[in-house]
Amino acid sequence: MVKRVFEKPLSLMERVLFLDFMKGLSITIRQAFKRTITTHYPYEKLKPPKRFRGFFGHKVINGKEPQPAFTEWVERFKIAVEPGKSRCVVCLLCKRACPVPQLFEIEGEKLPDGKRRVSIFNMNMMLCTFCGFCVDACPVDCLFQSDIHETASYSRKDAVLDLSTLEKIGKDWQNRREDEPDRIWADDNARMRLWYENSPKLG
Amino acid sequence: MIAVILIKVLIIVALVLGLGAFLTLVERKFAGHVQRRPGPMVVGWHGLLQPLADGLKLITKEDLFPSMGNRILYNLAIILALVPAALVFAVIPFGPEFSIGSISVKPILTDVNVGLLLVFAFGSMAVFAIALAGWASNSKYALIGSMRKAGIVISYEVVITFAVMGPIILAGTLSTYEIVQNQIQQKLWYIWVQPIAFIVYLFAMLAETGRVPFDIQEAEAELVTGFTVEYGGMKFGLFPLVEWYVEVLSLSAIAVVLFLGGWSPINIPFIGFVDPLFFLGPFSGFVWFILKLSALFLLTLWIHWTLPRYRIDQITQIAWSVMLPLTLVNLVLTAIIAPLIWR
Ligand code: SF4
Ligand code: SF4
């Protein structure tokens, strides 16, 4: 049995005195005198949470790779390990996971000593949906998404991230935010101001 | 004499257009704060110079014209929108008569004895501008917008005429200046005896100026601002300027004249006037007029940024089945009772 619920029809008093109008008007005028909750964007910027899905980067080799996965993959593919360079082992799992695989352009090269390393890694951000599948697929925690979100550029070419850009973003990230606790909201006064009204009561 | 008139014309034109531009800022600030944003903040102190920046941007923009449009009507529409709206200010009395030296000046451009008739004649001409704009741009959104406007004209124009007849009967004249004089003599703002007419007038004013809840000719959610959609640059800027600011100002001024006693201070019905601004001396009249005008303008903004939009059939229904009978009853009662009291 479905109980049907209708909006209560307006009573005569409400119709004659525009009471429902008054209700709306009183709400807007009360809001108008409260503090504003916006940030003045170009002058004032919010820090995105650590899990933010922004532009991509390659974490570089710095001794904090996930073990034993990293060593296994390095041994399997005979990858040249050079600190300060990309962790990528050219497994192409990211390209496989991606719903738009053609945006990846990944190539490896063979060094004279028989070892291998990544030589080309282009990601065309014009096609990316920022779904994060590629990041989940990466077995060595190389590819990741940073908090860079102001990504406007003057040409389409600028939207293609190449290997050196990715490494640069990765190094920058590892310096800035790698050690932060992985929380959804950063402890950030600017953000607190945005949400000061709905401080959640837990429990 | 001609010099005085020229000075008046200059003051009114400068005031109307300058104020219209400045009111865009007022509106954006108000809208912002209603939605908990600060509005324009960058150009000047708290965005005070934003209208200048906007004007500069609009003037330097490219002037586009739809290839299949009608260029003459397209440009005529702009003139037809601006001129009648500005002309209404010719019959609005801004304050009491005063004298500089030996010349006595009435702060009204022409005190014609059919002032109110002129106001509503000009008001109806503004509709042609919108209809022409939609027709000349040869675009479906513009045409739908202007057809909607033409559709609701028949509802609010009738209603507004009947609404203002109450105060006219009470004052016994059509001259705007004398209507105010009569209110002062009778020691009565007509809003105290004509509250229904006042509400109906507000309703028609919102409909005429295309303000929410009756902004169906713009309807930015569905019609992408309706009849202005094919206009660009300053030509686009003029339409909202005229409709949303100049017309709201002129119709609010008429409402102040008709219902709120023009430049007279606060009224206690049938007893007299209380003037908390007496220390301003001869300026107090002007200040009262401006205060009432801005109160009405802010009320319009407040309603605009609160309510959702009515459908066209709902507007017509309200106008014909609620507002019109109300004003008719009001009119008949006024016509019966008014002569008993004042004559
Ligand atoms: S975020 Fe999604 S769409 Fe973008 S590269 Fe990764 S897998 Fe492809
Ligand atoms: S999944 Fe990771 S390691 Fe494999 S190719 Fe992509 S970025 Fe390189």
Image: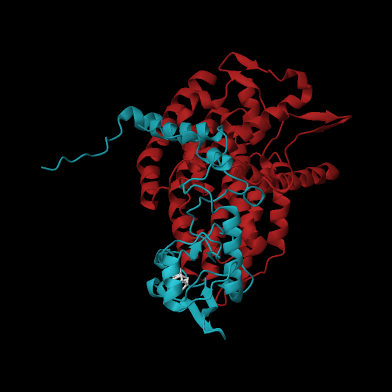
Chain colours: A cyan, B red
Ligand 1 appears in which quadrant? bottom left
Q: Nearer the viewer, residue B198 or B232?
A: B232
Corner quadrant of residue B61: bottom right
Q: Quadrant of the N terminus of chain A?
A: top left
A150, above or below A71, in the image: above
Left or right side of B278 for A65: left
Is residue B56 among the parts visible in the rendering?
Answer: yes
Q: Nearer the viewer, residue B189 or A84?
A: A84
Left or right side of B149 for B279: right
Left or right side of A94 for B229: right
Determine the residue located farthest toward the bottom in the rendered image: A112
Residue A98 image position (x, y, % from top left)? 40, 72
Q: What residue lies at 67% left-to-right and 49% top-to-bottom?
A: A43
Q: Quadrant of the C terminus of chain A?
A: top left
Determine the residue located farthest toward the left in the rendered image: A1
Left or right side of A77 for A120: right
A5, above or below B244, in the image: above
Q: How many marks?
A: 0
Q: What residue lies at 56% left-to-right and 67% top-to-bottom?
A: B230
Is residue A152 among the parts visible in the rendering?
Answer: no
Q: Nearer the viewer, residue B191 or A19?
A: A19
Residue B309 image position (x, y, % from top left)? 43, 48
Q: What residue lies at 80% left-to-right and 44% top-to-bottom?
A: B5
B197, above or below B82, in the image: above
Residue B2 image position (x, y, % from top left)? 83, 45
Residue A22 image position (x, y, % from top left)? 44, 31
Determine the residue located farthest toward the top in the rendered image: B271
Q: Nearer the viewer, residue A89 or B294?
A: A89
